[in-house]
Amino acid sequence: EVQLVESGGGLVQPGGSLRLSCAASGFTFSNYWMSWVRQAPGKGLEWVANIKQDGSEKNYVDSVKGRFTISRDNAKNSLYLQMNSLRVEDTAVYYCAREDLDSNYYSYFHFWGLGTLVTVSS
Amino acid sequence: QSVLTQPPSVSGAPGQRVTISCTGSSSNIGARYYVHWYQQLPGTAPKLLIYANSNRPSGVPDRFSGSKSGTSASLAISGLQAEDEADYYCQSFDSSLSGYVFGTGTKVTVL
């Protein structure tokens, strides 16, 4: 059974930093692209970042470029999101998601974790 | 602001059929990228409902179906049940943004 368990969320002041983690199990972690998707309170879903199987390629939504860094440790079956210079608008539940590829080699998000809440407030 | 537009809400009586539209543009749905759909029950994480326009993952009832035409896609729920009350999101890739995009979301209410 695929399981994704996020941790590391909490309350942080504007301008602060936080590191999220996602522990994966039930599948061969090193075979899959992985993503972070967030959802602000009462709002819709927003893709944040993803990372290739070996970590050699990373992509970000414009609003977090230069502030967030996605990484992974395949030996530990873990995905990370380092969030710096946090803003009030970064407040959201952050989900870890496993990507599967469609026949055009673009991704959909097949499995999701339960999420971890990040609150940026003074 | 999302580049994929969905109606904020749709409703129907038990047993009825409802459809949710997802309207994009030439840089996403119209560029022949696939559309995928997710169901988010209240207070829970999203769940994959339809992938690659019209395919159901294992365990998803065949009451749910997807289609795509031009720059739009649709999700249909037939034989509506109380347990289908949830938020539904479409998702695709956008070449102008070079990233994955979600629809604005639609809340389905069972009357």
Image (spheres, helix red, strand yellow):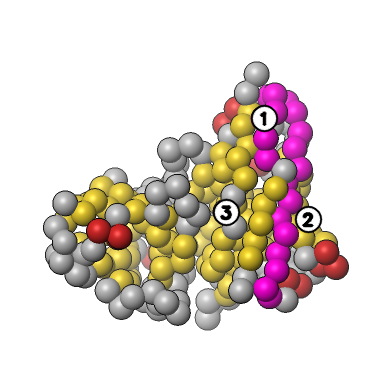
CB atoms of marks 1 and 2 within 8 Å: no
Residue on which the image places disc 2? A71
Question: Disc 3 to disc 1, how far (Cα)?
Answer: 18 Å
Report whether B47 appears left or right of A53: left
| Image coords of residue A81 (percent x, y) | 73, 48
Report whether A108 appears left or right of A75: left
Could you tell me which residue is drawn at 33 percent across and 75 percent down?
Answer: B61
Answer whether residue A19 is magenta in the image: yes
| Image coords of residue B104 (percent x, y) | 39, 48
Answer whether residue B107 is magenta in the image: no
In the image, which is nearer the foreground, mark 1 or mark 2? Answer: 1
Residue on which the image places disc 1? A11
What is the secondary structure assignment of the residue under circle 1?
strand
Chain to which mark 2 belongs:
A
What is the secondary structure assignment of the residue under circle 2?
strand
Chain to which mark 1 belongs:
A
CB atoms of marks 3 and 1 within 8 Å: no
Could you tell me which residue is drawn at 39 percent across and 74 percent down?
Answer: B60
Type of amino acid at the residue the image marks with label 2: Ser
| Image coords of residue B56 (percent x, y) | 40, 77
Type of amino acid at the residue the image marks with label 3: Leu
Q: Which mark is residue A114?
A: 3
Type of amino acid at the residue the image marks with label 1: Leu
Magenta-tinted stretch: A9-27
Quadrant in the picture for the N terminus of chain A: bottom right
What is the secondary structure assignment of the residue under circle 3?
loop
Could you tell me which residue is drawn at 70 percent across and 48 percent down?
Answer: A7
